Image (cartoon, rainbow, N blue to C red):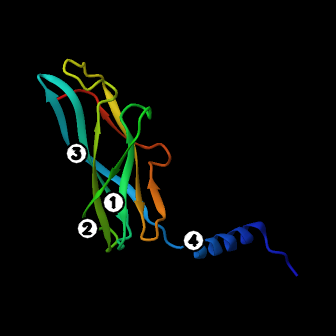
Amino acid sequence: MRRPTIGALLICGAILLSAVVGKAETVWFKNAGDRYDYNYMGSWIYTSVMVNFGVWPVAAGHSAGTVYTADGWRTAFWGEASWVANVPNLYGGNDEAWRVRLFGNGGNGNFAGARFVPFAFEFALYVDDQYGARYWGNNGGLNYQIPISSAR
């Protein structure tokens, strides 16, 4: 009688694991836009951007959001996302479109006369399923980044 090879055992284990784990939600960053720079008395105070992202599969009971920073993780903020629509995907099904607004000043100060210093929003996205399980989209562990190189 032949013994199973390591490769065969690994394949069987992967099949069993996938049957136990099942299908998980997927979250991905689409784009950022709708930038707004708040100025007061001729001085830049802060910048906000709208982050658009997708969730698959379409399912009831989702909630989504982000954790982000604008100062290299000295401070962190949580933002609750808003569902936009279910949109067709390339595979003949639908994805959920979500969006969330980020606010930051890169630690430049919130006062009139503050000098603008370039910074970046760094963030990860999440979706919670109807059972409370959280799934993350974080650019393969590198986090997503949106550089803000100049005030407008």
The residue carrying mark 1 is: 54
The image position of residue 32, as x and y in percent, is: 27, 46
In the rendered image of this protein, does residue 4 appear above or below residue 135?
A: below
For residue 53, side relative to residue 48 (left or right): right
Disc nearer the start of the sequence (3/1) = 3
The reply to whether discs 2 and 1 touch (Cβ–Cβ < 8 Å) is yes
Instruction: Tell me how far mark 4 sits from mark 1, CA to CA.
Output: 22 Å
Whichever of labels 2 and 1 marks the residue nearer the N terminus, that label is: 1
Q: Judge by depth and name the residue closer to the eye, 5 or 68.
A: 68
Alpha carbon of mark 3 to alpha carbon of mark 1: how far? 15 Å
Q: Where 150 falls versus 140 (above or below)?
A: above
- Amino acid on which disc 4 is placed: Val
- Pointers 2 and 3 in contact (C-beta within 8 Å): no
Q: Which of disc 4 and disc 3 is earlier in sequence?
A: 4
Residue drawn at the location 31% of the way across and 65% of the way down: 96
Looking at the picture, how far across and down is residue 75, in whole percent?
41, 35
In terms of sequence position, does the residue under pointer 2 or pointer 4 come before the other? 4
- Picture quadrant of residue 82: bottom left
Going by the numbered disc 1, the residue's amino acid type is: Gly
Q: Residue furthest left?
A: 41
Residue at which label 2 appears: 87
**Disc number placed over residue 21 in the picture, else none:** 4
In percent of the image, x 69 and y 74: which residue is there? 12
Query: How many discs appear?
Result: 4
Q: Given contact means CB atoms under 8 Å apart, are the residues at marks 3 and 4 in contact?
A: no
Q: How far is the residue under mark 3 from the one under mark 4? A: 36 Å
